Image: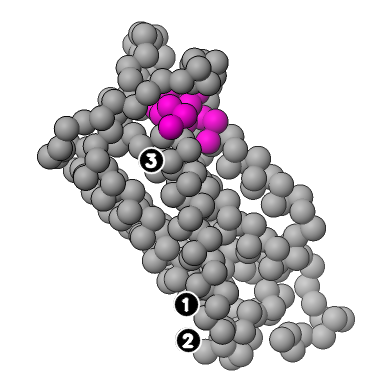
């Protein structure tokens, strides 16, 4: 319930700016520390395979997509995309709950990699001709393939974006742009030849299931959803930590 009168409500751009800067150090440091910890564990799992590696199958769809070096830029934007939900939150308890969901998603994916290591088939491509892709292949090989965590995190983020932007009163444009961005990232996992279709579908399924359960748990916590037009100071008064 908002206690701000209609006459005193700021514009949507001012509200979004205020929301973005709320607890920005917490958001920034949490993202940096979280991503760093994830990559440390990810690469450790990639180099410590205890079980036989399963080669993922190439499909007709994979061959139809082909290899497109320009998609590397789109592939890399995932690490910006996944920061959007937290940047649009103003409650510390929601931030904490969101980050816990991200951790659960990562733990499930990494556990699958440890128990069922998989690898994508090597395409007949001279990576030396494509420096950017060659660098990606050197730091992130063809293992840890299925489910694609790139696809899982993109899907998880997209669903949280839809929920938050709807709460903020978006009339549809931002949600459409977020969905298009997510689809672009999913496409890039195939166009860079980092993953095949089976990996992609596995990642989408993982991200979808975790996000739906996570969002349902948040909405069932009986927290009063704050009006995002409130200032952080007013939110602190209305919803003390």
Residue at position x 36%, y 60% from top? 104
**For residue 170, what is the image quadrant?**
bottom right
Which is more N-terminal, label 3 or label 1?
Answer: 1
**Front residue (pair 113, 165):** 113
Q: Is residue 187 magenta?
A: yes
Tags 2 and 3 touching, CB below 8 Å: no
Q: CA distance from mark 1 to mark 3?
A: 29 Å
**Front residue (pair 72, 155):** 155
Q: CA distance from mark 2 to mark 1?
A: 7 Å
**For residue 16, what is the image quadrant?**
bottom right
**Front residue (pair 118, 151):** 118
Q: Is residue 218 above or below residue 82?
A: below
Q: CA distance from mark 2 to mark 3?
A: 37 Å
Tags 2 and 1 touching, CB below 8 Å: yes
- Magenta part, dominant SS: helix
Tell me where the magenta segment starts and ends, as one range. Answer: 186-198
> Is 169 on the left or on the right of 67, as rendered?
right
* Residue 183: x %, y % from top left: 60, 38
Residue at position x 61%, y 90% from top? 238
Q: Which mark is residue 93?
A: 1
């Amino acid at each position: 319930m908002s206690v701000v009168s209609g006459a005193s409500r700021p514009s949507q751009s001012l509200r979004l700016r205020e929301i973005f800067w709320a607890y920005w150090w917490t958001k920034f440091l949490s993202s940096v520390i979280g991503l760093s910890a994830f990559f440390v564990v990810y690469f450790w799992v990639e180099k410590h395979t205890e079980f036989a590696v399963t080669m993922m199958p190439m499909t007709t769809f994979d061959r139809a997509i082909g290899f497109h070096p320009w998609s590397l830029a789109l592939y890399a934007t995932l690490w910006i995309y996944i920061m959007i939900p937290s940047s649009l939150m103003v409650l510390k308890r929601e931030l904490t709950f969101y980050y816990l969901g991200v951790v659960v998603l990562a733990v499930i994916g990494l556990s699958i990699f440890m128990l069922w290591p998989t690898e994508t088939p090597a395409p007949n491509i001279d990576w030396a001709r494509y420096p950017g892709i060659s660098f990606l292949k050197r730091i992130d090989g063809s293992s840890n393939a299925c489910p694609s965590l790139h696809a899982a995190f993109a899907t998880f983020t997209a669903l949280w974006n839809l929920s938050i932007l709807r709460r903020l009163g978006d009339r549809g444009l931002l949600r459409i742009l977020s969905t298009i961005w997510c689809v672009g990232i999913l496409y890039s996992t195939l166009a860079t030849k980092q993953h095949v279709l089976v990996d992609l579908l596995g990642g989408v399924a993982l991200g979808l299931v975790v996000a739906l359960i996570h969002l349902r748990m948040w909405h069932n916590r009986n927290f009063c959803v704050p009006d995002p037009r409130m200032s952080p100071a007013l939110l602190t008064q209305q919803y003390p930590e």
